[in-house]
Image (cartoon, grey):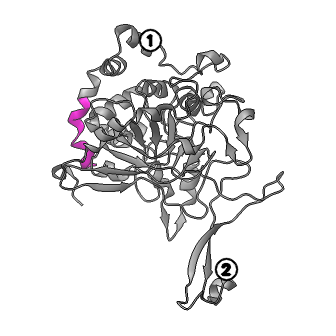
């Protein structure tokens, strides 16, 4: 707690400025533009039936990349200047550890992760007796080559004639623009019946993402609320004793503004990776490779999920970020009264379909938060998989924390 309380003095900066007007001015909007921006900052679900109101998208009718277009060579160069000239650069893994039985959003067929080891070139009676997969027992060649490889178990679901195994839509992930739509329509007006193939989608797939190297911005909402002493925003600790936000806490525009002041972030810029920390990843903590059942139930949103809603998504969309992500599996709030509007995951729909902004999920941010690193180089290269709806390779952060302000271990 002490490490957060030392930043209490910074929080007063946020309350002195109007969030919408100040930030809109910082990106160069005219007075009319500020008024227009303020006018769309509401929670009213967007009417996608008016197709002309949302496509063609802001990057032209042929675009398949959305706001990744903002990650230019100049943007990457600017991001790399965050570590240029530093004598010490730390590397942070922002991905969740994948393990058998890793939980996922309930679908049919299910999102499952069941890794199996295969062996070759030696005998292992105990492994075989337990049902292990043996490719071959005798080593290969004069050099007696042996090997290990993995396979993934498939699951047969009711109503399907073939078993299916894992998906990229599991664990730390970056959703593609072909993931969420409005009926048969997806980003930039692409129709599902025109782009769906047995192997994936012929438009908007992961092959259009490419490597991403940009500025990462940590909005540490958990750290902010601990510093403020806002007990209403803090939920029960995880089984490992770590704090997390309350299960249905809505992150507001004011929280975003305050978190920027808390982290010394002066402005949000086009092409940024904007990342929210709630502590939700601690609910996946395991002891002896076994998670806590109550924590897994809570992680799955049985009591709700902390996150942003439509007003906050539209507020952030003004800055044209490359992606908006969180350490939860949905980014958006669930189980809150604002969810009683009859919609399903409207933040995903607005960001992906309307604004072309990708959604990051289950991004682990404890390392940068621990080192009070609120700006860093964000790196990720999703699977180069044709027609895939997302990538789940773990991102990384590169940063140079100030050693004089790091907490004592």
| Mark closer to the observer (2, 1) | 2
Residue at mark 2: 135
Q: Is residue 77 visible?
A: yes
Q: Is residue 19 left or right of residue 247?
A: left
Instruction: State yes or no: residue 8 in magenta.
Output: yes
Q: Most extreme residue toward the left, as rendered? A: 404
Q: Secondary structure at mark 2?
A: strand
- Picture coordinates of residue 1, whole percent (x, y): 28, 49
Q: Earlier in the sequence, mark 2 or mark 1?
A: 1
- Picture coordinates of residue 304, whole percent (x, y): 56, 40
| Magenta-colored span | 1-12
Q: Is residue 68 left or right of residue 80?
A: right
Please tell me in which quadrant of the rendered image residue 17 appears: top left
Q: Secondary structure at mark 1?
A: helix
Q: Residue at x 49, y 64 (%)?
A: 286
Q: Is residue 322 left or right of residue 178?
A: left
Dot 2 crowding, Cα within 10 Å, few <14, some 14–19, many 20+: some
- Residue nearest the observer in this picture, 65 or 36: 65
Numbered badge on residue 82: none
Dot 1 crowding, Cα within 10 Å, few <14, some 14–19, many 20+: few
């Amino acid at each position: 707690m002490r490490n957060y309380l030392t930043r209490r003095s910074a929080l007063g900066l946020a309350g002195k400025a109007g969030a919408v007007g100040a930030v809109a001015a910082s990106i160069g909007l005219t007075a009319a533009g500020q008024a227009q921006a303020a006018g769309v900052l509401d929670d009213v679900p967007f009417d996608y039936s008016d197709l002309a109101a949302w496509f063609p998208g802001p990057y032209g009718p042929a675009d398949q990349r959305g706001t990744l277009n903002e990650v230019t060579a100049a943007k990457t160069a600017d991001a790399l200047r965050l570590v240029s000239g530093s004598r010490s650069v730390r590397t942070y893994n922002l991905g969740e550890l994948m393990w058998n039985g890793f939980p996922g959003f309930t679908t049919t067929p299910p999102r499952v992760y069941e890794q199996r080891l295969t062996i070759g070139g030696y005998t292992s009676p105990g492994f075989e007796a337990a049902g292990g997969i043996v490719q071959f027992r005798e080593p290969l060649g004069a050099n007696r080559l042996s090997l290990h490889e993995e396979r993934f178990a498939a699951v047969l679901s009711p109503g399907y004639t073939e078993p299916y195994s894992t998906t990229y839509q599991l664990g730390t992930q970056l959703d593609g623009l072909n993931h969420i739509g409005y009926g048969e329509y997806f980003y930039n007006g692409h129709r599902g019946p025109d782009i769906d193939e047995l192997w994936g989608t012929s438009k908007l797939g992961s092959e259009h993402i490419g490597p991403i190297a940009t500025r990462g911005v940590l909005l540490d909402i958990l750290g902010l609320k601990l510093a403020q002493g806002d007990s209403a925003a803090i939920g029960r600790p995880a089984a490992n004793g770590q704090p997390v936000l309350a299960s249905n806490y809505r992150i507001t525009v004011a929280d975003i503004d305050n978190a920027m002041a808390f982290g010394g972030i002066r402005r949000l810029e086009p092409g940024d990776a904007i990342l929210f920390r709630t502590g939700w990843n601690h609910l996946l903590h395991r002891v002896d490779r076994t998670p806590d059942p109550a924590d897994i139930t809570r992680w799955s949103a049985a009591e709700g999920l902390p996150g942003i809603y439509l007003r906050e998504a539209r507020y952030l969309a003004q800055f044209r970020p490359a992606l908006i992500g969180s350490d939860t599996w949905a980014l958006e709030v669930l189980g809150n009264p604002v969810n009683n509007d009859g919609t399903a995951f409207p933040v995903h729909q607005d960001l992906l379909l309307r604004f072309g902004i990708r959604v990051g999920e289950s991004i682990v941010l404890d390392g940068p938060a621990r080192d009070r690193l609120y700006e860093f180089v964000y790196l990720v290269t999703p699977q180069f998989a044709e027609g895939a709806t997302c990538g789940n390779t773990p991102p990384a952060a590169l940063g140079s924390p100030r050693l004089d302000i790091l907490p004592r271990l």
